Amino acid sequence: MEALEQWTYQHLLSLILWSPVVGALLILLTPKTNVRQVRFWAHLFTLLPLILSVYLWIAFNPYQPDMQFMESLEWIPALGIRYRLGVDGLSLPLVALTALLTFVSVVYSPTAIQVREKEYYALFLLLETGLVGTFMALDFVLFYVFWEVSLVPMYFLIGIWGGPNREYAAIKFFLYTLVGSVAMLLSILVLYFNSQPRTFGMVDLIQQQPLAGRGLLQVLAFLGFYLAFAIKVPVFPFHTWLPDAHVEAPTAGSVLLAGILLKMGTYGFVRVCLPLLPEGSQVFWAPMAVLGLINIIYGSLVAMAQDDLKKLVAYSSIGHMGFVMLGIAAAAMDGGAFADPDRLEYKVIALNGATFQMIAHGLMTGAMFLLVGVIYERAHHRDINRFGGLWSQMVVYGSLFSFFAMGELGLPGLAGFWGEFLSVLGSFQLFQWAGLAVIGIVITAAYFLWTVQRMFLGNPKEEHGNYPDMNLQEHLSLWPLALFTFLAGVYPKGLLTIIHTAMENAVSQMAKVLGGG
Amino acid sequence: MSFKDAFVLLLGPELWLTYWGFALLIVDMVAPRTPRKAFGLMTLFAFIGGLVLVVFQVAVPDLPDRIREVSQTNDLLYWLITTFSLDGLGSFSKVAIFIGAILIGLVTVDYVEKNLTEAIPEFYALMVFAVLALCFMASAVELITLFLAIEFASISSYILAAYLKADARSSEAGMKYFLVGATTTAVGLYGMSLIYGGTGTTYLYHISAQLMPNLGQTGVAFAAPLPVVIGVLMLLATLGFKVALVPFHGWCPDAYEGAPTPITAFLSVASKIAGMAALVRVLSGGFGPASAGWQSVLTFLSVVTMTFGNLGALWQTNIKRLMAYSSISQVGYLLIGLAAFSPSDFRTLVGLSTFQPSDMALPGILYFLVGYAFANMGAFAIIIWVENTEGAVELDRFDGLAQRSPVAAALLTVAFLSLIGIPPLAGFFGKFFMFGAALARGLGWLAIAGVLNSVISAFYYLEVVRRMYFLAPKREVGLVKSLFLSSAGVVGILGTLTVGVLMEPAYQWAMASLFDVVFSPGVAFR
């Protein structure tokens, strides 16, 4: 028994990573008609990684800046490619978030998905492996493999179970992301050919800084990564795939798209661009900050103009991801900041905010998309103006919706507040015009309040008279998210302690290269 | 080792195929009632045996060296191995060719059953002879021998392409293939005469030894006598025709569309592998020191070929034509490896140094070919499967295939994902090496052209996937059961996956295969 525990402990990351694939294989072996069995496997094999990641969270040492639970096996020795996994304070919350959101999505799915369920759940589990792998991989080739593996199932999820315009949305999503990832591939190869000894290991490469002082080459490598990550985030003007994909995807697909896939981009910035290409990041800090602000303001303004509830949530994601980009830009900025311990601290604050925002946004937008799905299953439309007075008919639904809307608009005491607050606080100290982000916060508050008003307040309408309140699956999928949104809001320290260590490590790494600290 | 032993060991797979080719014809004569399927199985057996024999040749320790040793005292053998070499490059290519051939054999049986009515044993015999010719192409180290091998392969292929007598398109395929083939071979032959005029020899090892002083030169007059350079470029017409390189690709879409589908598969896989092997051997081996003369041309053609292939594929409504353009574009990627050829690669080819794993260019080509063979054959197995059921291969025949036959749809999807270059499939690592080689040689723009093309290619591959998964089926019936076709598909896809995930051995072997494939000019060889 103890041996088993030890073994589990040593291979914890691999277990979390591969158990969904096992589930997918079991589903493929189940006959198509045996839907109950298919659902059972899907639930079991998303619950398993969730339980394991809770264990991971508990066993994780938040004060240790290095990678933990490392696994390293030979894969392709000729090229120095290894099967390297590990988590730190940046990736641990994202891994846990992925496990949680995948599980609640699977719990929710039986309500919404009634056709071709076998394929659906198999792809869903495969998607989880791709996402978790992206956050765990510490080898660039492995990272790239998972990055691409997550692309394919999502293409099918949108294209098969999506809305009326699904085929267009699916191919647009695939091609956009592929453009970014092939650019990243070239940058990875550039890093490899400039490393000595040759390696694809992220940690080794960060130590080596192969492109330090290589001016143009570092800038080009940065741009390759930037394209991949910015498309994924998405940063204005690379965002046009997002409204299509998020709106057309089935509810559970949107949850993972908004909750996790967008974070792959911001994760990449913090994991790769900042510590590995600090000079390149520094060159582009101002454009990144400006684009972040555009994201915040433009995204919020466009969201305000939407009548389609799902589109509104989709555009609100663009706005919220702007705060993450703002924090990242603040960390990338130099102007002597790396020599000054105080301003170094602001960078850490801004990055803490950015990473906190990733998690908070994942929880809340995931919930928002589920809530959109709940009402869509009843009304079969999403036009905000056609709703009204829903609160009196669907009490729990109305309350939960308002709760998450408050979270999204950054109400202090809920998760959304801390990310935006810290990110703006940190960046404001470094460049005052970051304060423009406040405009976005105001607009966000405006449209979320207005949405709640239009949908839930006022006189009940005849056509929505007989909607039942949420069913069991919807309850089960939404309450955990509400719980964590609340917990992260009232006790942010639990999450921030973990994040802080990793962010401090990243900033000190940059400071080491850029000469200051 | 006596001469006889050396002879048999040297030519084992080729002799084996020759016997089987004739055996098929003789069996037909003496036992005309033999069931058709038996001929298919015999062909399959011939190909499997060929693969075993090649692997045996590789497994015998130091076989090439021992044969060379015997040739020191035997004129006939000496003459033989200076024209037909048993070396790593040849063996590796033959393994790839035989993998392709076995899968082609598997997909042929049911196709023949369904679509051919007469002259079936001859069909199989011609296939065996065509593969035999490809083996000679892969091993030829002398220009005239190479020319004969190419002609042998081409003539067999012309007949095979035109085999569906009742179908005008098949005749058109054979005719176009023949006309383009005849023209380009004539040009190539003239090129060979120029090379002979410039160097006084047709032996590749002589040529490379003569050009050796120019190794690494990039300066005036292409670092080689002008007639030689012109000759090489003319020779490129012949080899370019075999691999469907733009601008010698004109036959490709029509021939692919009209030919019996297994022959389409043969042209796009086995024939292309042999062509690439010859291209690598002649250009980087024989004319490696004069790389300044051909490299820039090839770099240009690489971009043109992949772009043309991908753009052309976008508009196709027939999957065989789509596969034709797709295979043109894949050659474009492969040529990146030759465009990234460097003088240090040549030093490995002549046995003066060994490859580092980061010298991705030439080993990458060989690895790419294996991955391509598996993925493309997997795709063709499914295409033939659909064709056998539906009687046509227009793209709309694939609508809703995922619900009619989930396994077939999944296999075709994986094959296409590999051709797009999605990891961890073999197609990804093939492109990975090509782009890596380009970047390592400072050809960043070529790598960028390559990745942009990959994105374009995703569009038309996914068009088929879209039809299979997103559209509703027009008919509810599944595909007709076929053990041969499904197993060919499964083998192809498992091969793509295995060669991709467990890439190390294939890559190591590819690296080792390229060591000392042109006789070391330094060695006093009589």
Image (tube, coloured by chain):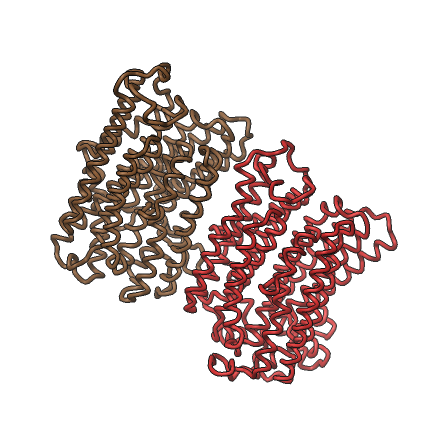
Chain colours: A brown, B red
B359 over B483 or under it: above or below:
below
Give the x, y percent position of residue B519.
59, 77
Q: Furthest residue to the right?
A: B30
Residue A136 makes an appearance in the image: no
**Depth check, front residue: A243 or A428:** A243
Residue B220 located left or right of residue A483? right
Q: Residue at x 75, y 46 (%)?
A: B115
Would you say A474 lies left or right of B393 here?
left
Asked if residue B91 lies left or right of residue B445, the reply is right
Measuring from the top left, give residue A45's x and y in whole percent.
42, 34
Q: Quadrant of residue B251?
A: bottom right
- Measuring from the top left, give residue B88's x and y in whole percent: 59, 68
Q: Residue at x 71, y 49 (%)?
A: B108
Q: Residue at x 82, y 57 (%)?
A: B25
Q: Residue A472: x percent and y percent?
A: 37, 21
In the depicted view, which residue is nearer to us: A28 or B300?
B300
Indicate the quadrant containing the C terminus of chain B: top left, top right, bottom left or bottom right.
bottom right
Placement of A358 over or under B477, stated as above or below: below
* Total numbered badges shown on the rendered structure: 0
The answer, for residue A303, to whether it is visible in the render is yes
Quarter residue A386 falls in: top left
Check the image and report above or below for A237 versus B290.
above
User: Residue A90, located in which quarter of the rendered image?
Assistant: top left
Q: Quadrant of the N terminus of chain B?
A: bottom right
Which of the pair A132/A321 is nearer the observer?
A321
Q: Is residue A71 above or below residue A159?
A: below
